Amino acid sequence: MQENKFPRRYLIVLLTFVCTAVCYIERVGFSIAYTIAADAAGVNQSSKGTILSTFYYGYALSQVPGGWAAQKIGGRRVLLLSFVLWSLTCALVPLDPNRVFMLVIARLLVGVAQGFIFPSIHTVLAQWVPPHERSRSVSLTTSGMYLGAAAGMLLLPTLVKFKGPQSVFVAEAALGAMWSVLWFKYASDPPRSEHPKAAAAGFGESLLPVKGNHKLKVENGGSSIKTLNIPWKKILVSLPVWAIVVNNFTFHYALYVLMNWLPTYFEQGLQLSLQEMGSSKMMPYLNMFLFSNIGGVVADHLITRKLMSVTGTRKFLNTLGFIVASLALMALPMFRTASGAVFCSSVALGFLALGRAGFAVNHMDIAPRYAGIVMGVSNTAGTLAGIVGVELTGQLLEAAKVADFDISSPESWRLVFVIPGILCILSSVVFMIFSTGERIFD
């Protein structure tokens, strides 16, 4: 009789939360383990940038196919497949910074596998979670990313110190395997009776309710709603859509540069050992976890209490988040102590996460029926930001070396942080001018 007390859908949401956390432990873990191994082997910064950014090439390639596969064979299966693929890759590939080709192939594979994860999660949640619980469940699931990153930052440097960089791969593969077993055991396609509301809301179609006048044929856990003609041209020439895309690009540029290069900045820029920094180094990600949930609550409060229009709320939170983040990013290289650097990167990432209550929810305001599509387009831009930012940072650091700056001098790092800082200001202006909270695609 346990079933009734704890609804199955909560278990599904909980498992997807753990899923995103494990994925981000993997990403942060790779950047920590690889940074330490590569520095020990004397790999130059530009080559480090190439290896660190390879993941994002794979990730960019599989976003759209991932959404398609999840709709065709079901998000539950795709999620399991993806986890098994990346866990095996982690388990089997030796971390040898000198075997570049091997590492590139491995990172591409992991990137492709993880690209399937978010589209699948959205498909699964759309099937299980009734409309009135969606915002909360999506916020919770995505905040798992930051909690995972914080846990990885806290625990993995110590693991590297005592067991070597390769141990991180083994630990990640083990986590992936454990999650796969839990998912295989507990996840199922929803039985009809459990989600009359979800079925009425366009079962598995998008994260938001579809207008009720469509005839629904729910077959074997998939839906064939009268096939929607996706207005591609209208979406691609829409300025509010571009406002979301630009902000998604900037958000991920800053996040991925910090996620991949903070270990190098602490170890070489500031000459600190990650392992000795204690729990402070996970603060930036813990802050993201807190602020992304705060942002969601504040936004809902402003809108439901009619204190601000939807448009006003989105613009207010987006601008606040991005402007504060830009100041913190630009100030970052001026702080030469561990606490200063942690403080600045925490403010930067925390307020960027707050800004997510602006641009990242906005696709549901303007195009509820095509939220998945708009999200796919803007996520692809976000992933491109990872490729550009992570790669460019390696080249900036290499160039600084050539210009006779030492990598431990603030000059070497100034541009690295000023670029995302300027991007934050520009994109918040774009969002102020062009975004809207009104529905523009019916």
Image (spheres, grey):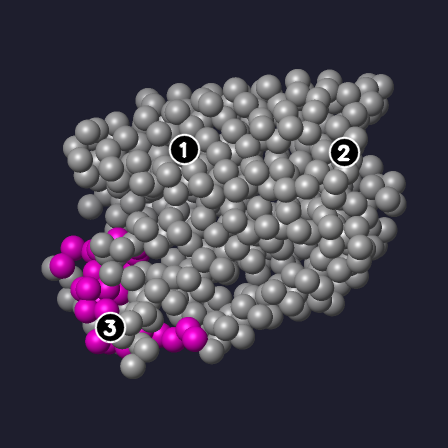
Q: Nearer the viewer, mark 3 or mark 2?
A: 2
Mark 2 = which residue? 272
Q: Quarter holding the N terminus?
A: bottom left
Q: Secondary structure at mark 2?
A: loop
Locate residue 79, reporting x and y percent. 49, 66
Q: Check disc 2 and give the amino acid type.
A: Leu
> Does 207 appear in magenta?
yes
- Residues in magenta, as a range: 186-212
Residue lying furthest bottom in this view? 1
Work out whether mark 1 precedes mark 2 in sequence or the reverse, and give the earlier one.
Answer: 2
Rate crowding at label 1 as few (under 14), some (14 to 19) or many (20 or more) other CA atoms within 10 Å: many
> Is residue 395 toward the left or the right of residue 176 in the image?
right
Residue 235 in view of the camera: no
> Is residue 289 toward the left or the right of residue 329 in the image?
left
| Label pair 1/2, CB-CB below 8 angstroms | no
Rate crowding at label 3 as few (under 14), some (14 to 19) or many (20 or more) other CA atoms within 10 Å: some
**426 or 299: nearer the viewer:** 299
| Label pair 1/3, CB-CB below 8 angstroms | no
Work out whether mark 1 precedes mark 3 in sequence or the reverse, and give the earlier one.
Answer: 3
Mark 1 = which residue? 355
Which residue is at 21% across, 76% downward?
193
> Does 149 appear in magenta?
no
Locate residue 204, reporting x and y percent. 31, 64
Q: Check disc 3 and give the amino acid type.
A: Glu
Rate crowding at label 2 as few (under 14), some (14 to 19) or many (20 or more) other CA atoms within 10 Å: some
Q: CA distance from mark 1 to mark 2?
A: 30 Å
Q: CA distance from mark 1 to mark 3?
A: 35 Å
Q: From this view, report whether residue 201 is shown above or below residue 46.
A: below
Mark 3 = which residue? 194
Residue lying furthest left in this view? 213
Which residue is at 72% across, 27% downward?
396
